[in-house]
Image (spheres, rainbow, N blue to C red):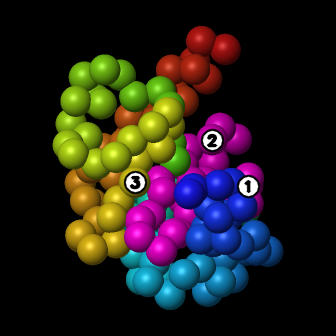
Amino acid sequence: MRTAENIRKKASPPAEDVDAFIKASPKEAQAKLKQLRVIIKDTAPKADESIGYGMPAYKLNGKWLAGFAGYRKHIGFYGMTYLSSDEKKGLGDYETSKGTIRFPLDEPLPENLIKKILKARMRYNEKKMNKG
């Protein structure tokens, strides 16, 4: 049975910085977490990296951009909350919930999809700042 306690045990533990977070994550997820970190930094090089909500978090111009966590069977990527319905159509068969997409560890990370999600979030944040 999936309980909150079991889920927490499988998730990456809290850490002081992103390097420590990745190192403390399940071994099965570490390489993909490193890869995801590079994708985020390449797509949003001006984003500030920190730990927020107990996971690596990225903010651009002070606004939430994305975050991630490693589990034994998947990577949780957080930052989809404001995708348009058209943008959500391109998510394929990945498991999703509000604001989250899960990438299985036994498949390559979909780099183009991750970049698309990040760019959509950056556009959303820009519009929000300009209305301001």
Query: Foreground mark, 3 or 2?
Result: 3
User: Which of the labelled discs sits on residue 64, or is there none?
Assistant: 2
At 24% from the left and 70% from the top, the residue drawn is: 108
Residue on which the image places disc 3? 102
Q: CA distance from mark 2 to mark 1?
A: 10 Å
Amino acid type at circle 3 is Arg
Range of the magenta residues? 52-77
Describe residue 5's horizontal placement relative to residue 37 as left or right. Answer: right
In x, y percent, where is residue 86?
Answer: 25, 22
Q: CA distance from mark 1 to mark 3?
A: 19 Å
Choose between 67 and 120: the one closer to the eye. 67
- Give the vertical position of 30 relative to 18 (above or below): below
Kind of element beneath mark 1: strand
Kind of element beneath mark 3: strand
Dot 2 and dot 1 residues touching (CB under 8 Å)? yes
Residue on which the image places disc 1? 52
Choose between 42 and 29: the one closer to the eye. 29
At 68% from the left and 54% from the top, the residue drawn is: 4
Q: Residues within 10 Å of mark 2 (few under 14, many from 20)?
A: some
